Image (cartoon, rainbow, N blue to C red):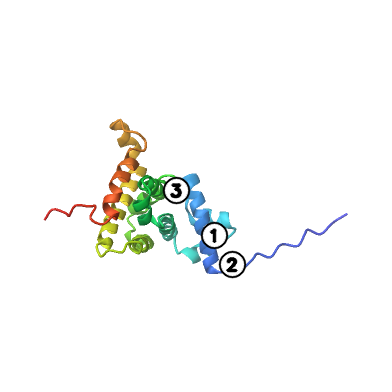
Amino acid sequence: MYSKPPPRQKRRKRLGPEVREEGLAAARKLLLKGGPAAVTLANIGDEIGMSHANVLHHFGSAASLQSALMGSMVNDLTVALDHVVEMLKTDAAAPRVIADRVFDAFDKGGAGPLAAWIILSGDVEHLEPVRAAVRSLVDAIVGQSGDEGAPGRVRQAVLMMAVTAFGDAVIGPYVRDMLDQKDDAMRDLVARILPLFLIPSGLPPAAA
């Protein structure tokens, strides 16, 4: 006896911010599983149940999606580094904890290879979400400091952490092997230097 197929479920309409949030979550999942090359509009669409055209409408291009993902990763660091200045003043183990959070974002979190992918593509304008996120990170840490020299020191600290964590994620394993260094050698070095940047009067002035 013929039976009617079940009625097709009506697809739930999603607002733009919700689609972007779901798309970025799917992009991060794809990044960790397949690397930057897996973060495509088509793959995102498959993950969140949307057509390629709809994903394109919300993100503009694969490059824009990848840079938005990179920006969201830096924003995550803003949350991870909450109370960082107070931690450095009160907890002897804090520098290593902070270094691990930043290095994990670039290594295990996939931000290092993704940043390299974006930069090597030559689409520098797509770094704008990253620029905004980095500035937010600096502002958040500066807000934890009460002295007038904090902005300059924090920018230097973020520069040091970001560049070293990026380099360690991309080429670190090979260089460490050449120099017979432990896997966490760069993290340990950053942990030892970091307090000099974030605690007042800790970093000697630059040579004139």
- The answer to whether residue 171 is seen in the rendering is no
- Residue placed most toward the observer, 140 or 90: 90
Q: Tell me which amino acid carries mark 1.
A: Glu
The mark found on residue 22 in the picture is: 1
Q: Which residue is mark 3?
A: 109
Lateral position of residue 186 relative to residue 72, left or right: left
Q: Nearer the viewer, mark 2 or mark 3?
A: 3
Amino acid type, residue under disc 2 in the picture:
Arg
Whether residue 205 sits left or right of residue 144 in the image: it is left
Q: Which is nearer the eye, 46 or 169?
A: 169
Is 206 placed above or below 60 here?
Answer: above
Gap in angstroms between the C-alphas marked 2 and 3:
27 Å
Q: Which residue is mark 2?
A: 14
Circle 1 residues within 10 Å: few <14, some 14–19, many ≥20: some
Are discs 1 and 3 less than 8 Å apart at CB? Answer: no
Query: Dot 2: few (<14), some (14–19), or many (≥20) neighbours within 10 Å?
Result: few
Q: Taking 181 as reference, is 156 above or below it?
A: below
Q: Where is the N terminus found, in terms of image quarters?
A: bottom right
Q: Earlier in the sequence, mark 2 or mark 3?
A: 2
Relative image position of residue 129 (x, y in whole percent): 38, 62
Quarter the C terminus occupies: bottom left
- SS for dot 1: helix
Where 17 sits versus 90, above or below?
below
The answer to whether marks 2 and 1 mark residues whose Cβ atoms lie closer than 8 Å is yes
Residue 77 picture location, percent across and down:
41, 55
What type is the residue that disc 3 sits on? Gly
Q: Is residue 181 left or right of residue 74?
A: left
